[in-house]
Image: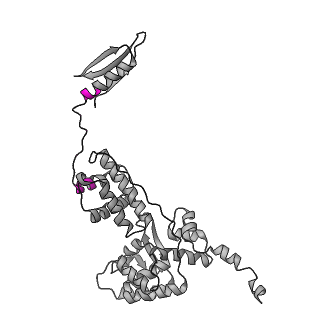
Amino acid sequence: MKKVRIYQRKNRRGWYVGWYEYRKEKCRAFPTKKLAEHYQRILYHRLNTEVFVGTIEAPWQTMKREYLRTFTLRGLSKAAKYEAELTLRHFEALCGPVSSKYLCQEVISGFIEDRVASVSVGTVNKEIANVRAFISWCAEKRYISKPFKIDKMKSVQRQPKPLNSAQIRDLLVSARVKSECWYVRVLLAITTGLRSGDIDRLTISDIDFEQNSLSTRSKKTGKSMPSRPLPISIMPVLAEYVGNLAPGQVALMTETNTHKKWKKIRSRAGLPDLHFHDLRVTFSSILQQQGESLSVAQRLLEHADPQTTAKTYTGVDAVLARAVNKLPVDSWLA
């Protein structure tokens, strides 16, 4: 891109337009600044008529591969790259491997509408942020002419729904009807607070039956806990489950965690609106109801900020509940 500048000379009247052409510096004088600016615009277009200002058509896989490669080059975390890759995978599944020529506002809007029908608004907003970044990169690389306007969706903060003891029993019974694998999956979620993806990644060797512990690594944050304690009462259940697995089995979970299977289990238990993540909330809530401190729950949930644990992963505040129960209500009702 060739530049054209306007300037004045010391002790000389008028304005000058300067530029480089054929490796030589050239200039032209004008009596007023307005005339100089007018000539600057004309000259700029004449000098840059051969500069490419269009777009380059590229196939989907090429754009996807180049974009994900930038995460490593920019030194971004593996978790950020994984989230971006997951969003692009969902986009490809719903909209197909569209080339840059067909990547438009209508396609993006269709993707968002399809995702809203199957996942929460919070998840959709995360994916919108990832799509925004990808579209901006495409515009920068001239795969598209300009970025699209993609607004995030307004969402109502969903309140956590910890389960009570009766609901937990019903859920475990329903899970066992489906399979022993689902029974163990739900049991581990309630007794460890692990995310669904982290449970699915567990291997048999991660269980230490002597120390009653579990070795875990968070897929989302990358944090690891080599010796996560397990309740002693569930160890016989785990030992029986592992003993019945096929020889050579490595993964602890033998069935995939799909939305369809989970929907049947929660519906059979009378909990049609239950999210699997609510089991993590239940774990935190019960710990605090039993008198454990917020810091203990925070460490087991692997939260960096205690406010996250306090705001989202607590049902009824245990301290407030104990305070209210000190009221002499029995004497009032007698």
Asked which quadrant contains residue 253, the reply is bottom left
Q: Nearer the viewer, residue 106 or 103?
A: 106
Quarter of the image with the C terminus in it:
bottom right
In x, y percent, where is residue 235?
46, 85
Q: Nearer the viewer, residue 238 or 48?
A: 48
- Write the residue at 53% across / 87% down: 166
Q: Nearer the viewer, residue 22 or 29?
A: 29
In x, y percent, where is residue 214?
45, 76
- Write the residue at 24% across / 56% down: 60
Q: Which range of residues does the magenta coloring cover?
A: 44-64
Quarter of the image with the N terminus in it:
top left
Kindly give the residue lying farthest to the top in the view shown.
Answer: 11
On the question of residue 48 being in view, the answer is yes
* Image position of 109 with respect to 53: above or below: below
- Write the residue at 27% across / 45% down: 142
Left or right: 307 with respect to 258? right
On the question of residue 229 being in view, the answer is no
Asked which quadrant contains residue 4, the reply is top left
In x, y percent, where is residue 244?
34, 88
* Image position of 4 with respect to 173: above or below: above
Left or right: 38 with respect to 305? left
Left or right: 72 with respect to 233? left
Is residue 42 a member of the stretch shown in magenta?
Answer: no
